[in-house]
């Protein structure tokens, strides 16, 4: 098993920037009259917008940080059984949250007992109650009571749920798994592979080659059916790519060959971008919505280059306060991800809208930047009160 340093601050910084940009682009999607390149490209086009690079970066960073979490538990003396339970419970939490978020999209306020905004706020509060990072000093009875309340709320929201349109009313179902659900499945598959092979780079490289091969086969017509759990293998390809980069970093640091890291990572990043551009005409173009091979390669390449940049700035140059203003987005990332649900649905519940000026053009984009900063700042305040999710 490869041994990694306890924590790479560069990963936290990269994660923080990615989370900040995720909140920004999601908020900016409601702003009109902005440059097309900022938003997501349409699903039927051969194109990629700036917003299309954010989620794949997050999946790649998931892979970068995954070995840290597992190796740290091994160093603490945890058994293989406990580590597997940790992987399964973490994946289950993400899948549950993703499942509820997907059904939020098709929620039918006219048929349901409560408005969509109220349902969304209640499930978000339930997520906090169940997966809050409760202090060790809290009495177990109180902790379990709060967690139990969260579970009861989720069950109640499932019972009263009404989805669909018109006369076609449906109950909760998986049309897809949502952002958190995709992360959950990808984490489950990649973490289990890493755990089973004990982090051996040779096995991990074979795994990513298989995943990428499946994705290429899917988009060249060789494979006509999506596979169970991994689908077209785009998410697991990105996550496993991050794991391999962490493995290379660990290997060269242990061998005293850290000087190889900058040049190698830059070369890998550039080659992946070039590979994406080369395969683009032959494998369904470039598209986030269709999760094509070109999109995977280009986004992975960009993320590796950004990772190397932050290794240089933060880990090598010691600029630990780099992007300090958004640091909570790198340490309480899931909390940051859920904060916009409070903002958006509280505004919807009380009929509050941003003024026209703040919903258009450059002023609207500045508003989106401000929203991202404010939500992350609030998470920073919440961190000090131990109000953060931990799964």
Image (cartoon, helix red, strand yellow):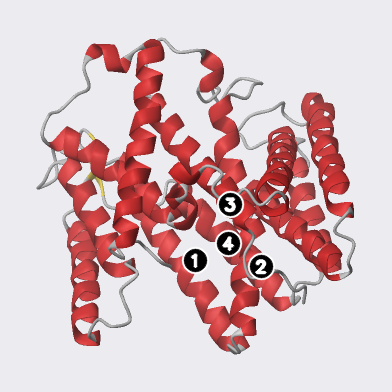
Q: In front: 305, or 54?
A: 305
Q: Which residue is mark 1?
A: 91
Name the residue rendered at 61%, 56% in the picture.
9
**Inter-mark Cα distance, 1 to 3:** 31 Å
Q: Which residue is mark 3?
A: 320
Q: Position of residue 178 (x, y in %)?
A: 44, 47
Answer left or right for 136 relative to 276: left
Q: Which residue is mark 4?
A: 187
**Inter-mark Cα distance, 2 to 4:** 11 Å
SS at badge 1: helix
Q: Earlier in the sequence, mark 2 or mark 4?
A: 2
Q: In front: 279, or 83?
A: 83
Q: In front: 182, or 168?
A: 182
Can residue 289 be seen in the rendering of this structure? Answer: no
Viewport quadrant of the C terminus: bottom left
Name the residue rendered at 54%, 73% in the picture.
87
Answer left or right for 359 relative to 190: left
């Amino acid at each position: 098993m490869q041994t990694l340093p306890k924590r790479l601050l560069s990963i936290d910084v990269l994660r923080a920037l990615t989370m900040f940009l995720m909140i920004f682009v999601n908020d900016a999607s409601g702003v009109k009259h902005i440059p097309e390149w900022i938003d997501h490209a349409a699903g039927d086009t051969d194109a990629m917008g700036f917003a299309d690079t954010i989620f794949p970066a997050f999946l790649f960073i998931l892979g970068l940080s995954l070995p840290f979490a597992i190796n740290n538990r091994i160093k603490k003396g945890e058994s293989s059984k406990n580590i597997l339970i940790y992987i399964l419970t973490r994946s289950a939490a993400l899948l549950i949250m993703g499942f509820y978020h997907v059904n939020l999209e098709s929620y039918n306020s006219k048929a349901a007992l409560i408005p969509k905004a109220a349902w969304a706020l209640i499930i978000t509060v339930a997520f906090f109650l169940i997966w809050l990072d409760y202090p060790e000093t809290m009495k177990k009875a109180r902790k379990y009571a709060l967690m139990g309340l969260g579970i009861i709320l989720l069950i109640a929201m499932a019972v009263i749920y009404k989805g669909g349109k018109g006369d076609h009313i449906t109950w909760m179902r998986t049309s897809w798994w949502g952002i958190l659900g995709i992360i959950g499945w990808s984490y489950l598959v990649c973490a289990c592979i890493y755990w089973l092979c004990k982090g051996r780079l040779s096995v991990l490289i074979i795994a990513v080659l298989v995943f990428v091969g499946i994705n290429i086969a899917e988009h060249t017509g060789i494979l006509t059916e999506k596979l169970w759990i991994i689908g077209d293998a785009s998410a697991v390809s990105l996550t496993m790519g991050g794991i391999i980069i962490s493995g290379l970093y660990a290997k060269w640091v242990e061998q005293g060959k850290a000087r190889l890291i900058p040049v190698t990572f830059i070369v890998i990043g550039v080659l992946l971008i070039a590979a994406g551009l080369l395969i683009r005409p032959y494998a369904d173009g470039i598209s986030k919505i269709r999760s094509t091979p070109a999109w995977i390669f280009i986004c992975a390449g960009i993320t590796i280059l950004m990772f190397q940049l932050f290794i240089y700035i933060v880990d090598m140059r010691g600029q630990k306060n780099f992007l300090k203003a958004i640091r909570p987005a790198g340490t309480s990332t899931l909390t940051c991800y859920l904060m916009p649900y409070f903002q958006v649905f509280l505004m919807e519940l009380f009929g509050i809208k941003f003024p026209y000026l703040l919903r258009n053009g450059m002023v609207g984009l500045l508003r989106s930047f401000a929203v991202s900063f404010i939500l992350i700042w609030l998470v920073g305040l919440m961190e000090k009160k131990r109000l953060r999710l931990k799964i």
